Amino acid sequence: MSKRLGPESEPRPGHPLPGREGEVPWQRWEMGELPQARRAAGSTPPSPEETARRKAAFQRQAELRALQDSAREAARQEGHREGYQAGQAEGFQAGLAEGLEQGRAQAREELERQLRETLTPLLPLAASFGEALHELDEVLAEELVELALATGRQLAGEALKARPKQVLEIVRGLLHTEPGMSGKPRLWLHPRDHALVEEYLGQELAAAGWVLQPDDQVTRGGCRVTSASGELDATWESRWAAVKRQVRRRAAPPPREEGAP
């Protein structure tokens, strides 16, 4: 049990309580005693040098913190600026590519429109020009055929003059025609060819019952045969007409297909 102290036993200010051996004496605290107690404990204020050192260290820390904040802000602004520039450049390139593509498309459309406007009126002209060329080809081909025939006729005439005995081959061919001529055939010849045929084929024709008949209406180099069964026309004119028909038939262009240009 605790023992109540009497008035004489209560500690008085400034007097330590009695304690055990080795314990710090107890003192009663009162306001206004803390500075004195600290001074009593041996505490001294910092020296001016220590104060200056602490201020300098604090200032350096503040400056370092300010530099760090400034560097962070500068880095943030630089990153923002670079990002803005990169985005602007990327947007510019994308816009440029899109603009170029649109420009090319518009240029192609404009070129196609101009071509249509320019070429549309020329289409009928081109069609008529193609038809004119085709007709010109046909005319030229026909003229070339006529030229070739005229040249051939002239050459044939020259050959006939150089070889008048060609008529003998014609007469011999008619003599051996199958079926043979019935009745008493008559061979009509130019008077000069008549003399030539009579000299070389007279006996053979007489044996076959043919009669030679001179006719100055027959062109030299040709002849004709008449009989009761019909007539064979081997005159120069008829043979040349057959040659021309053959040449023109071969030179004629193929028929054009319907709808072809």
Image: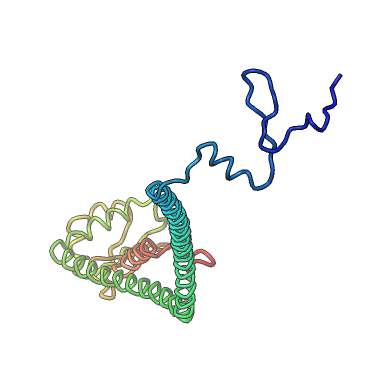
Residue 179 x, y percent position in the rendering:
42, 51
Look at 56% across and 40% down and name the residue there. 38
Left or right side of 27 for 253: left
Depth check, front residue: 179 or 208: 179
Residue 167 x, y percent position in the rendering:
23, 60
Depth check, front residue: 100 or 23: 23
Q: Is residue 98 visible?
A: yes
The residue sitting at the front extreme is: 8
**Depicted 149 relative to depicted 250: above or below:** below
Quadrant assignment, res 24: top right
Q: In which quarter of the image is the N terminus?
A: top right
Residue 180 x, y percent position in the rendering:
39, 52
Look at 39% across and 63% down and name the residue there. 249
Quadrant assignment, res 130: bottom left
**Number of labelled discs?**
0
Look at 46% across and 63% down and name the residue there. 88
Which color scheme is applied?
A: rainbow
Depth check, front residue: 30 or 135: 30
Left or right side of 5 for 104: left
Q: Can residue 229 be seen in this view?
A: no
Residue 129 x, y percent position in the rendering:
41, 77
Left or right side of 149 for 43: right
The residue sitting at the left extreme is: 162
**Depicted 46 relative to depicted 244: above or below:** above
